Amino acid sequence: MTIQVLSTLDIFIRLLLAGVLGGLIGLERQVVKKSAGFRTHVLVCLGCSVIGGDQCEQRRQPCHD
């Protein structure tokens, strides 16, 4: 089993994707006037992405391909 190290570009793409997808969910909720709108979902998704990536690095296990 080989351990893959994520490049800076990989990390950037994952964070960008998490922010965009979280923003889409938050935008939809904001349009229908529900609580936890755009900013909340973007921040939660970015935070989850950072924590998930950090967990892979700390455990030295391969992350998802």
Image (tube, grey):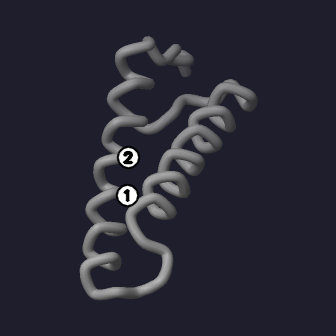
Where disc 1 sits, the SS reads helix
Residue 27 higher or lower than 51, as above or below:
below
Residue 20 higher or lower than 39, as above or below:
above
Q: Residue at x 57, y 50 (%)?
A: 48
Quadrant where the C terminus is found in the figure: top left
Q: Nearer the viewer, residue 3 or 32?
A: 32
Q: Nearer the viewer, residue 16 or 39?
A: 39
- x, y percentage for residue 63? 51, 34
Using residue 12 as the reference point, say whether residue 63 is left or right of it.
right
Q: Residue at x 42, y 36 (%)?
A: 15
Q: Residue at x 74, y 28 (%)?
A: 58
Q: What is the three-letter code of the residue carrying label 1?
A: Gly
Q: Residue at x 34, y 36 (%)?
A: 16
Using residue 54 as the reference point, say whether residue 42 is left or right of it.
left
Residue 33 higher or lower than 24, as above or below:
below
Where disc 2 sits, the SS reads helix
For label 1, count other residues whose C-alpha is less than 10 Å away and answer few (under 14), some (14-19) or many (20+). many
- Count of numbered badges drawn on the protein: 2
Q: Nearer the viewer, residue 27 or 14?
A: 27
Residue at the spot of label 1 = 22
- x, y percentage for residue 60? 68, 25
- x, y percentage for residue 20? 29, 48
Report whether residue 40 is seen.
yes
Q: Determine which quarter of the picture holds residue 33.
A: bottom left
Q: What is the three-letter code of the residue carrying label 2?
A: Gly
Q: Mark 1 touching mark 2, by CB under 8 A?
A: yes
Quadrant where the N terminus is found in the figure: top right
Residue at the spot of label 2 = 19
Give the distance between the C-alpha atoms of the residues marked 1 and 2, in whole angstroms: 5 Å
